[in-house]
């Protein structure tokens, strides 16, 4: 899971994942069109995303297509986020708002 967090830590890699989310199965050239970085830099970012299993590739003839693999992100959700139930967070937020409203001076 550490490699997934490391991969997600970089904003450029998150942008690549967002692009694949919006249009899955893109070539390197297609991905480069939306980023202000060199082809070589995009290739390095994709390699880290593949290492984290966030991106999987498939060769179709001469084209290498990149696909988002959401499973590691789901694992993070299951392990780190799900346990903070939305209902509990909403209750805490409401309590905070009420306390702040009651402590404001007129």
Image (tube, rainbow, N blue to C red):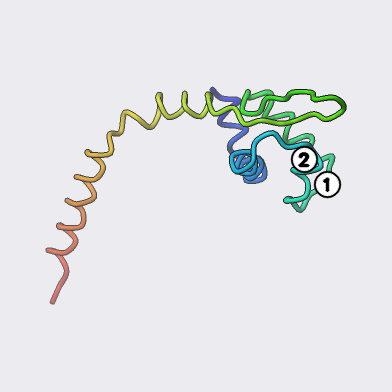
Q: Is residue 1 left or right of residue 87?
A: right
Above or below residue 106? Residue 101 is: above
Q: Is residue 25 left or right of residue 6?
A: right
Residue 45, horizontal then vertical, whole percent: 73, 36
Above or below residue 106? Residue 20 is: above
Residue 55, horizontal then vertical, whole percent: 66, 28
Q: Is residue 42 left or right of residue 3?
A: right
Q: What residue lies at 40% left-to-right and 25% top-to-bottom?
A: 78
Numbered tag placed on residue 42 in the rendering:
2
> Within 10 angstroms of label 2, few (less than 14), some, or many (20 or more) residues?
some
Quarter location, residue 51:
top right
The residue where tag 1 is placed is 38
> Within 10 angstroms of label 1, few (less than 14), some, or many (20 or more) residues?
few
Which quarter shows the C terminus?
Answer: bottom left
Residue furthest to the bottom in view is 106
Above or below residue 6? Residue 14 is: below
């Amino acid at each position: 899971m550490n490699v997934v967090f490391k991969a997600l830590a970089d904003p450029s890699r998150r942008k690549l994942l967002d692009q694949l989310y919006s249009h899955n199965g893109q070539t390197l050239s297609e991905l480069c069109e939306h980023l202000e970085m060199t082809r070589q830099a995009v290739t390095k970012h994709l390699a880290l995303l593949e290492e984290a299993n966030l991106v999987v590739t498939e060769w179709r003839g001469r084209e290498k297509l990149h696909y988002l693999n959401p499973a590691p992100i789901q694992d993070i959700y299951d392990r780190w986020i799900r346990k903070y139930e939305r209902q509990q967070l909403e209750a805490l937020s409401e309590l905070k708002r009420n306390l702040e409203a009651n402590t404001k001076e007129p």
